[in-house]
Amino acid sequence: MDETRARDLATRAIERLGGMDAVEHLFVEPHVPNPEQEFVIEDQRVIVRLRDEQRPATVYVGPYTFELRDRRLVRAAGA
């Protein structure tokens, strides 16, 4: 899987949760036990971790990690 395909799958998962605006504004309290949503899109596991007070929403697709910043997905630093 290349980064372009991973980004497309990440975007599709975000859309299933209501889109970039909705996910960027969703906020999870620290005590919430499962702040993640998992999807299977085109036989690929995609995990969306909702944002909390310490980090932005994060999407994991295969070896790639993206963060949702200013309504767009950016490759996570060090990923």
Image (cartoon, rainbow, N blue to C red):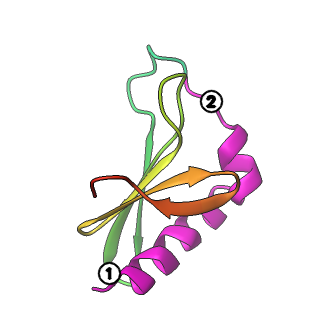
> Where is residue 25 drawn, in percent x and y?
72, 39
Q: Which mark is residue 66?
A: none
Task: Please count the marks in the image.
Answer: 2
Task: Specify the quadrant that holds the N terminus.
Answer: bottom left
* First in residue order: circle 2 vs circle 1: 2
> Where is residue 56 drawn, in percent x and y?
53, 39
Residue at x 71%, y 60% (from the top left corner): 19
Let me know if residue 16 is in the magenta part: yes
For label 1, count other residues whose C-alpha is less than 10 Å away and answer few (under 14), some (14-19) or many (20+).
Answer: few
Vertical position of residue 32 compared to residue 22: above or below: above
Residue at x 61%, y 50% (from the top left corner): 69
Residue at x 45%, y 34% (from the top left corner): 35
Cα distance in 3D space between marks 2 and 1? 28 Å
> Where is residue 37 drawn, in percent x and y?
45, 49
The residue carrying mark 2 is: 27
Rendered image quadrant of residue 39: bottom left
Rendered image quadrant of residue 17: bottom right
Q: Amino acid at mark 2?
A: Phe
Rendered image quadrant of residue 15: bottom right
Q: Report the predominant secondary structure element of the magenta stretch.
A: helix
> Where is residue 60 drawn, in percent x and y?
35, 58
